[in-house]
Amino acid sequence: MVAPASDGPRVRVAAVILVGSRLLLVRQRMSGEPYYLLPGGGVDHGETLEQALRREVLEETGLECVIGEPLFINDTIAPDGHRHLVNITFHSEMTGGALLRSPLDPSIEGVELIEPAEILNLDLRPPIAVDLLAAISSGFRTPAQYLGPVWTDEQT
């Protein structure tokens, strides 16, 4: 039996923010083991990508940021079709605020600053750690890339 397709893709924006030399990540747990995400979230109807990303970063981390150039675009499509996200990841810079000790989103367990090389050992979703590390290592001088469809099975 084939699961019904989603109503349509959802657009999610994410920010790559370095605080000093460390990468800002959020640790999330929906069920099972925790995993890591770049801060960000869904774009609401009538909201620009920039407005959505600034709002989401502030809600999840307590930090204010300026949005820079896009780095990556990828699809996250569940094998059974129940979920389809279009992820747009931007280089961003912190401009103010303070890291939240207790994020407002109950699914977020914490906000962490990670050495970039450590992301290769994390369950980063979407699974773009290699591309992300390359962008950071290049000083964000690479052009935006379409990474194609990526998916992380919840069972892994």
Image (tube, rainbow, N blue to C red):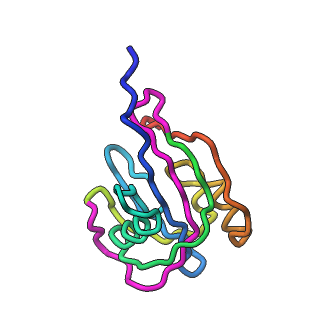
Q: Is 94 placed above or below 106 here?
A: below
Residue 11 percent location from the top left of the image: 44, 51
Query: Residue sitting at 35 percent across and 76 percent down?
Result: 62
Q: Which residues are magenta?
A: 77-105
Please identify the quarter of the rendering in which residue 45 is found: bottom left
| Image quarter in which the N terminus is found | top left
Q: Is 24 placed above or below 76 here?
A: below
Query: Residue sitting at 73 percent across and 69 percent down?
Result: 141
Farthest residue, direction top: 1
Farthest residue, direction front: 46
Q: Does 56 sit left or right of 125 as displayed?
A: left
Residue 39 percent location from the top left of the image: 44, 64
Of the pair 133 and 53, the residue shown nearer to us: 53
Query: Residue sitting at 47 percent across and 78 percent down?
Result: 65
The answer to whether residue 123 shows anywhere in this view is: no
Q: Does 11 sit left or right of 142 as displayed?
A: left
Please identify the quarter of the rendering in which residue 97 is found: bottom left
Of the pair 53 and 107, the residue shown nearer to us: 53
Asked whether 97 falls inside the magenta stretch, the response is: yes
Residue 134 percent location from the top left of the image: 70, 61
Query: Residue sitting at 54 percent across and 43 percent down?
Result: 75
Residue 63 percent location from the top left of the image: 40, 78
Asked whether 87 falls inside the magenta stretch, the response is: yes
Q: Is 9 placed above or below 136 here?
A: above
The answer to whether residue 12 shows anywhere in this view is: yes
